[in-house]
Image: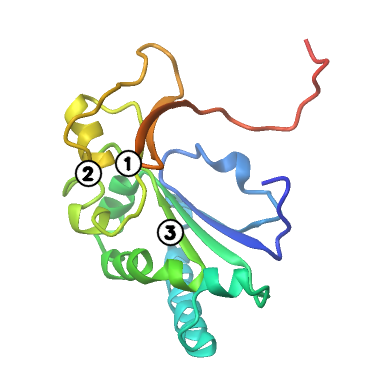
Amino acid sequence: MMRWAPGTINLYIVDYSNGLLSCFKDSRMVGGYITEETEDRLKNLFHMLTELMITRRTQWSGVGFVQRLRAMELKEPAVVLVIDNYGSFREKTEQRYDREMLELIKFGETYGIFVILTGAGIGNTDIPSRLFENCRVGICLLLNDKYQYSECLREIRIPILPAEGISGRGLARIGGNILEFQAGLCHEGNDYDT
């Protein structure tokens, strides 16, 4: 987040995980930070994202975000919608935004609108299967068993499971391979702090 200018990327954070993403709310790239307490702003956010997708679809006339980026014709920022704890979001909003979410995940990437969801798994009570089927990438952190990893990574046999007892360990598919990774929280700091 420190290397990109607000003119190149805009983040919209919907935080239904008791403020776990609140450390990002004052970033100059964050156009909106919504929690359960400010849920009334969700309608405006989804309206804005839907209108943005329609506008870009019309203006770009068949040329997608990646093509415009490669041709150096891109003046509009990428937009990233982050929803933390999607299961809680769906429950508390009574699944009001399911249709909009499916549209954003299916077609948003073509128009520079990207979606990041977090959840405890895939299924009706968290990230619905029909929504997940349209997601391109699954990244796993601390799932309950190998079957959940298998479902998230779309792999029948998982060759490796994350090391147990180490916070931030996860699995991701990179170039067709399942790899273990270590996540970290980035923040400004001083290498000389003790």
Quadrant the C terminus occupies: top right
In whole angstroms, how far apart are the C-alphas of marks 2 and 1?
8 Å
Q: Residue 175 falls in which quadrant of the image?
A: top left
Residue 39: numbered disc? 3
Return the residue nearer the eye: 135 or 54. 135
Residue type, mark 2 in image: Ile
Residue type, mark 1 in image: Gly
Residue type, mark 3 in image: Glu
**Residue 135 image offset from top left, x and y in percent:** 32, 55
Q: Marks 3 and 2: which is nearer the front?
A: 2
Q: Residue at label 1?
A: 119
In whole angstroms, how far apart are the C-alphas of marks 3 and 2?
24 Å
Q: Marks 3 and 1: which is nearer the front?
A: 1
**Residue 20 image offset from top left, x and y in percent:** 50, 36
Task: Identify the residue at horizontal 27%, vertical 70% (top origin).
Answer: 99
Circles 2 and 1: CB distance less than 8 Å? yes
Under circle 2, the secondary element is loop
Left or right: residue 52 versus residue 142 is right
Under circle 1, the secondary element is loop
Counting residues from the start of the chain, the first of labels 3 and 2 encountered is 3
Q: Is residue 144 visible?
A: yes
**Residue 98 image offset from top left, x and y in percent:** 27, 64
Query: Looking at the picture, does residue 57 appear above or below residue 30?
Result: below
